[in-house]
Amino acid sequence: MKQAGIHVTDAERVTVWVLTDNYYDATRPDTEYAIRYRSSPGRCIHAEHGLSFYIEIESGGRRGACMFDFGMDPVGVANNMDLLGIDIGKADAFGLSHGHYDHFMGAAKILKLNSSRIKDGTPFYVGKEAFLNRYSLRPGAKIATDIGRLDQTEIEASGVSIREVVNPIEIIPGGYISGDIERTTPYETPSPSLLVKRDDSLVPDDFRGEQALFFNVKGRGLVIISGCAHAGIVNTVKHVQNITGIKKVHAILGGFHLVNAKEDKIIDTIEDIKMINPDIIAPLHCTGFEAVAAFMNAMPDAFIINTAGTQYKFGY
């Protein structure tokens, strides 16, 4: 169902830290937009099969910060926050893209360890079905593997306030969560091997409550951050364009969930992203090696290889 539009306040400056990701390389050079963390003896960035962001925004004289997704290993994510100088106590909001363990596993412990510094009642935004049990049917397996669920009671025990999102809303000054993502592309369909338990039955997960973040950087355009883009990265970007009425896209970063995808799906995705023509494209996490390489070859001027601990600066 097509959602109503939303008025978006411009952000003058946006800083995005990738707190954890699948890949780290201390020798990657900085770019115009991406500043790398340089490990040194005893001060090493942790990488994992997980994803987590911390975002700070300046918008119309107001400032805000949020954490979006929490990775899988709370010790590793906490280590990276310390190295990067991130104070989670300054977060005005928390958000979760979807209910998969590599995005929520670190949440309960990170929030608990910092509960004395997090303002009581700080909103924790989730989409529909964030707390349902998920399963994965591994290649060649006949029985699905239980990959867990986020425990709402554990999250609320830290003092945050769960808020379920259906429609796009501003969660910090100049920073927005997408609401349910409209599906329009014929080829961006969820994997049949990813399942969810509804009413005691295992069914294919359509990720109906998946969320993304977005900002409109003044004079530059939209910055869109996805967790895994199970709804499709093209669907995600077009959804944000449609609800904001803003066509110019400055940057797309996040997981694109093209790992193990067929070649034609990767090609179709890249062709549609090229039509959108972002200034920056940074595929992370679950995008998959083949798709990352394909984006690099197809969009070399826009492409940035991400490493865990990278700080992105937009509007500076």
Image (cartoon, rainbow, N blue to C red):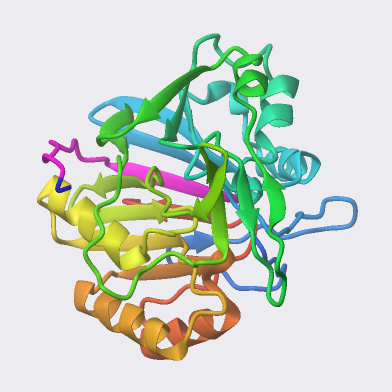
Q: How many marks?
A: 0
Q: Nearer the viewer, residue 200 or 14?
A: 200
Q: Classify residue 172 by image quadrant.
A: top left
Which residue is painted at 71% across and 60% down in the image? 38
Q: Is residue 307 visible?
A: yes
| Residue drawn 43% across the image and 66% down it | 32
- Picture coordinates of residue 110, whole percent (x, y): 70, 30
Q: Residue at x 24, y 53 (%)?
A: 182
Q: Is residue 127 left or right of residue 115?
A: left
Q: Residue 282 appears in which quarter of the rendering? A: bottom left
Residue 160 position (above or below residue 260)? above
Above or below residue 270? Residue 131 is: above
Q: Per the image, is 9 magenta?
A: yes
**Residue at the spot x=47%, y=54% of the render?**
205
- Is 314 within the magenta? no
173 sits to left or right of 31: left
Q: Nearer the viewer, residue 313 or 232?
A: 232
Please indicate, yes or no, whether residue 173 appears anywhere in the rendered image.
Answer: no
Image vertical order of residue 139 relative to residue 228, above or below: below
**Whole-percent x, y for residue 299 in the image:** 36, 84
Q: Position of residue 181 (x, y in %)?
A: 29, 50
Q: Position of residue 6 (x, y in %)?
A: 14, 37
Q: Image height check: is 244 above or below 252?
A: above
Of 124 and 225, which appears nearest the observer? 124
Spot the residue most to the right: 42
In the image, which residues are magenta? 3-20
